Every structure is written in structure tokens, then in C-alpha cells.
């Protein structure tokens, strides 16, 4: 059996180089289509397109949340502020000249000098190399996708095994229905004959008309086609599981068809034992439908 993937999973990836670290987290849940929700800092928006393409290449269905953080340890080793000592000295010299010419008190303290324009400035960080950062982010995303797919594959394999077990239960029940179906016709003939005799009493029973009525009823309750199609759907279901890949939508359609055939069998055969079998089949098919909706 080829790989089968669930749509539910979690993965985390980290990539580090030259004091910089990118961390990517991926969370996936069920969804009819591929729905991406990327939550990136503004400083990393340039990497969004590459991240989307990487996810789309690896995943075909599900709602995906991506969280990313970027740390630069180099900032901790840098001075937070830069002092322009030459400019500060010019401000102080100008203050002294103003004091001497205007004969006013000089209250120009250090704190006043620090407030002057451009004396103290925050160090401007070197413009980051977007290509380098994007490469680091994509490496972290690749690791996160690998981790996510491991979990998705493990759950998908578990779901596939359970689906096959339910198919076995269904296949074991179908022969019971096939054996019980002829009894429905016999029961109908006996009931119809008894009812006619009850009403007609001493009038002779017309066997030809009785046979025609039974034949008409036989055509109406015949479930051969439904049983054949049910076997075909089961075989097709197993083939799709064996091929693997994105199988969720295909299997969901087949399960719907299996449910329809089962409903038809139940409506045609008015037999308590067959009804019991049909209820069991519908229960197993409903469980399969819920599980199939978890597959990619």
C-alpha cells in the first residue's frame, strides 16, 4: 500500500546559521480544499511566496496554519546606541561662547547635551541579506513539512487499516443478505396466498394470477443489482487505498454510493433480519464516512 495521509498533524522546523535562527511551525486540520494561513512578521513578508509554493508542493488538501519567528543573536553583541562625540563637543563649545557673550549662567549639563539632535543615535543595523534569510526560512519550513508529514502519514496509515477492517465487516454481512433475500419472496407468496384464501374462502384460487403477482413483487424487491454494485464499490475502494496519495475526495464519493445502495436494499426488502443487516451496514458506512473525511 502506498502512503496515505491524514489531514491532521503538527510539525516544527528550525534552521540556524551565523547567529541567526528561523523557526517554523505548521498545524493542519481538515478542510475541503487547500487553505493556507501564513502568519509572518512584517520583516519576513518577502518570503511568503516561497513558503506558499513549498507547502503547495507537499500538501494538496487541508487547512494549514504557519507560524514563523526569526531571532538574530548578533544584535545582543552590538551596542544599542552610538554617541557622536565631535558633535557633542561642538554643542558644549557653542554653549560656552553663548555664556561668555551674553553673560548668562551656563546650565548646560550632560543630560542637556544628550537631548541635542543627533548626539546620541540608535545604531542602524546593516541591511539584511534577504536571499540569505529566505534560504534559512525555507530550510526551517522544509524541516517542519517533513515533521508534519511524518505525523500525517502515521495517522493516515492507522485510518487506512481501520477502513479496511470495516470493509471486511461489510463484506462478511453481504452474503447474509443474499441468503435472506429469497426468503422475503417466499414469505410474501405465503402471506398473499393466505390472505386471498381468507377473503375468497370457498372460491378456487387462481394460481396463475398469484404467480403473476409474486413475479411482479419479485422484480420490485430484487436486490441483485445493488449487491453487485456494492461489491464493485468495495473493490474500487480497496484499489484507491492501495494506490495511495490524495484519496480523500474519491473515497468520500464511493462511501456515499455505498450508502445509497444500502438504503435501496433496505427499502426493497421488508424483512426483519435483512433490516438488521442493513442497519449494521449503514452504521459501518457512517463510521467510514467520518474517517474518510480525515484523509487528504
Image (tube, helix red, strand yellow):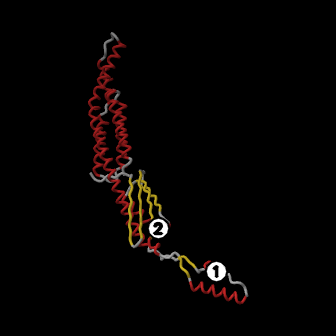
Residue 138 at x, y percent in the picture: 39, 66
Which secondary structure, mark 2? helix
Between 91 and 172, the residue placed more toward the observer is 91
Residue 47 at x, y percent in the picture: 44, 67
Instruction: Say if 209 sits above or below 110 in the image.
Output: above
Residue 12, quarter of the rendered image: bottom left
Query: Most extreme residue toward the top, as rendered?
Result: 202
Residue 94: numbered disc: none
Residue 109: numbered disc: 1
Between 31 and 239, the residue placed more toward the observer is 31
Between 194 and 285, the residue placed more toward the observer is 285
Which secondary structure, mark 1? loop
Residue 220 in view of the camera: no
Residue 59 in view of the camera: yes
Name the N-terminal-most of marks 1 and 2. 2
The mark closer to the camera, 1 or 2, is 1
Left or right for 24, reference 120: left
Between 96 and 187, the residue placed more toward the observer is 96
Residue 94 at x, y percent in the picture: 65, 87
Q: CA distance from mark 1 to mark 2?
A: 43 Å
Residue 278 at x, y percent in the picture: 34, 33
Residue 69, quarter of the rendered image: bottom left
Residue 189, quarter of the rendered image: top left
Residue, disc 2: 44
Local packing at callout 2 (Cα closer than 10 Å; few below 14, some 14-19, many 20+) is some
Amino acid at each position: 500500500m502506498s502512503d496515505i495521509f491524514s489531514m491532521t498533524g503538527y510539525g516544527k522546523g528550525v534552521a540556524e546559521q551565523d547567529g541567526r535562527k528561523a523557526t517554523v511551525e505548521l498545524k493542519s486540520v481538515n478542510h475541503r480544499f487547500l487553505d493556507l494561513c501564513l502568519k509572518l512578521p512584517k520583516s519576513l513578508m518577502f518570503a511568503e511566496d516561497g513558503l506558499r509554493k513549498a507547502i503547495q508542493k507537499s500538501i494538496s488538501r487541508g487547512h494549514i496554519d504557519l507560524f514563523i519567528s526569526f531571532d538574530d543573536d548578533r544584535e545582543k553583541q552590538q551596542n544599542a546606541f552610538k554617541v557622536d562625540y565631535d558633535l557633542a563637543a561642538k554643542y558644549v563649545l557653542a554653549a560656552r561662547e553663548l555664556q561668555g557673550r551674553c553673560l548668562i549662567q551656563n546650565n548646560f549639563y550632560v543630560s542637556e547635551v544628550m537631548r541635542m539632535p543627533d548626539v546620541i543615535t540608535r545604531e542602524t543595523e546593516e541591511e539584511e541579506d534577504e536571499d540569505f534569510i529566505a534560504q534559512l526560512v525555507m530550510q526551517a519550513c522544509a524541516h517542519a513539512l517533513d515533521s508534519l508529514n511524518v505525523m500525517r502519514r502515521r495517522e493516515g496509515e492507522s485510518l487506512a487499516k481501520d477502513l479496511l477492517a470495516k470493509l471486511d465487516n461489510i463484506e462478511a454481512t453481504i452474503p447474509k443478505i443474499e441468503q435472506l433475500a429469497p426468503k422475503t419472496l417466499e414469505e410474501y407468496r405465503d402471506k398473499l396466498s393466505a390472505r386471498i384464501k381468507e377473503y375468497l374462502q370457498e372460491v378456487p384460487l387462481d394460481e396463475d394470477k398469484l404467480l403473476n403477482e409474486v413475479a411482479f413483487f419479485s422484480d420490485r424487491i430484487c436486490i441483485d443489482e445493488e449487491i453487485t454494485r456494492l461489491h464493485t464499490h468495495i473493490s474500487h475502494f480497496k484499489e484507491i487505498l492501495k494506490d495511495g496519495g490524495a484519496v480523500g475526495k474519491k473515497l468520500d464519493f464511493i462511501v456515499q454510493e455505498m450508502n445509497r445502495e444500502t438504503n435501496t436494499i433496505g427499502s426493497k426488502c421488508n424483512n426483519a433480519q435483512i433490516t438488521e443487516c442493513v442497519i449494521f451496514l449503514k452504521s459501518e458506512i457512517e463510521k467510514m464516512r467520518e474517517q474518510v473525511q480525515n484523509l487528504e
